[in-house]
Structure formats: C-alpha cells, structure tokens
C-alpha cells in the first residue's frame, strides 16, 4: 500500500481590511509644515507685541493645525480614507489661512513681497524647493528680519499647498480603485468565502481520488 502525502490544501488568502498607514514624517509637505510651525512661532514672538494682538494666536494655531491634521489624517487613513481626505482638506485650509496672514503682514508693514524679478527670489525659491527639514531653516530664525522670514513662509505655504493638491489627487484615485473600509470589508468577506469554497472543492477531489485508489488496491489484493 502506497504512502500518500497529506493533501496540500490551498492557504486562504484574504485581502486586508485595514490600509497600510502612511509614514507622514517622510512626506515632504509635512516636513515643510514642521518648518512653518516653528518659523511662525519665532516670527510672532519677534515681530508682534507680547500681549494684546489676536493675530499671534491665529497664526500659530493655523500653522499647528496644518501640521497636526496631516498627522491625524494619515493615522485615520488606516480605517477611513474619507476621514483622511477631510483632515487633509482641513490642513490645506489652515495653511492657506496662514499664507493670508503673512501676505497681509508685508504691505501693512511697508515691506516687499519677493516675486519673479526680485534679486533674492530665485535663490529663495531654490532653497525652499531643495530643503525640507527644520534644521535647514532653524539656524536662520534669529538672523533673518521680518521681510525675509515672511517671504520664506509665503513660499513654503505655496509649496505645501501645491504638494498637497497632488497628494490628494493620488488619494482620490486610490479611493476609486480600492474603496473605503466598507468596500474593503465586503471584498475581504467575499474573498474568504471564495477561499472556503475552493478548499472544499479541493478536498472533494482528493476524497474521490482516494476512493479510486482504494478500489484499485482491493482488486490487487
């Protein structure tokens, strides 16, 4: 009588319901929001009165909101892409609010907004494009004057907004193809049932094969 190996039943493969969490610390626009938050904190401390100006709290909170909602959105995106998209929108809105405050600051203080053609514009743009980490900027926070800091902040705000628009577009495409948690739960459940049916069919075929082999052995005996 031959020895038969244990039937090789296909392992069940079930799609994950939870999405892989994005490491927000690696996102360039997040890194730039960290710079914006620290820069804004120093800027308001250096160039606004210590008490009595509500703009200080508004700017610091807008900068913090931009940063924190990226973190919360990335964390919530594990279970809810819808919530992730909403929080990313909140982050963008906060950065746009911060941008408006910096753009208001320059003319009200008779300072120049650096645009194309300004002698320092191209170098500023190049630096902001190629530097994302707080250490690249922090060493200048106490050296740059308010015009310099405000123009750097404005540039970073524009870059963050543009990067986030591209990132959100990618997330929208993912949502269309992968769905939210309800769709993923349904797909996982259907996948489980399909795997169960395949396993049962495999066992049925194996039983039939063993029956035939058993009959053949009886005849030989």
Image: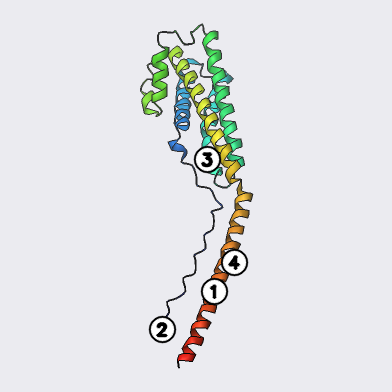
Query: Which circle's residue, 3 or 4, is located before the other in the chain?
Result: 3
Circle 1: element type: helix
Quick one: label 2, few (<14), some, or many (20+) residues within 10 Å? few
Evaluate whether residue 141 shows in this view.
Answer: no
Disc 1 vs disc 2: Cβ atoms closer than 8 Å? no
Quadrant for residue 103, please give it: top right
Q: Which mark is residue 197?
A: 4
Residue at (52% x, 25% y) in the render = 162
25 relative to 189, above or below:
above
- Observer-side mark, 2 or 3, equals 2
Mark 1 or mark 3, earlier in chain: 3
- Of the pair 209 and 171, the residue shown nearer to us: 209
User: Would you say the residues marked 2 and 3 are in contact, meaning their CB atoms lie under 8 Å apart?
Assistant: no
Distance CA(mark 4)–CA(mark 1)? 12 Å
Is 132 left, or right, of 63 in this rendering? left
Q: Is residue 44 above or below residue 30?
A: above
Q: Say which element carries label 4.
A: helix
Q: Are marks 2 and 4 in contact (CB under 8 Å)?
A: no
Instruction: Please tell me which of labels 2 and 3 falls first in the chain.
Output: 2
Label for residue 74? 3
Give how far apart the Cα atoms at labels 2 and 4 are.
29 Å
Image quadrant of residue 6? Answer: bottom left
Dot 4 or dot 1, earlier in sequence: 4
């Amino acid at each position: 009588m031959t020895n038969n190996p244990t039937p090789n039943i296909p392992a069940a493969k079930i799609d994950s319901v939870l999405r892989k969490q994005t490491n927000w610390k690696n996102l360039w626009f997040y890194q730039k929001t960290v710079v914006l938050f620290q820069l804004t904190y120093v800027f308001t401390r250096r160039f606004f009165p210590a008490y009595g100006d509500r703009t200080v709290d508004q700017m610091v909170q807008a900068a913090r909101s931009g940063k924190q909602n990226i973190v919360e959105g990335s964390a919530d995106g594990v279970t809810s892409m819808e919530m992730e998209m909403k929080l990313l929108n909140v982050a963008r809105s906060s950065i746009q609010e911060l941008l408006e405050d910096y753009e208001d600051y320059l003319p009200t203080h008779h300072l120049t907004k650096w645009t194309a053609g300004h002698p320092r514009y191209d170098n500023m743009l190049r630096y902001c494009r190629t530097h994302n980490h707080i250490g690249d900027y922090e060493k200048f926070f106490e050296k740059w004057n308010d015009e310099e800091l405000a123009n750097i902040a404005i540039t970073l705000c524009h870059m963050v907004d543009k990067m986030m628009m591209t990132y959100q577009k990618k997330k929208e495409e993912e949502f269309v193809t992968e769905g939210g948690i309800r769709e993923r739960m349904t797909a996982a459940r259907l996948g489980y049932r399909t795997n169960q049916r395949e396993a049962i069919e495999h066992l049925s075929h194996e039983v039939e094969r063993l029956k035939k082999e058993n009959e053949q052995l009886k005849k030989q005996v």
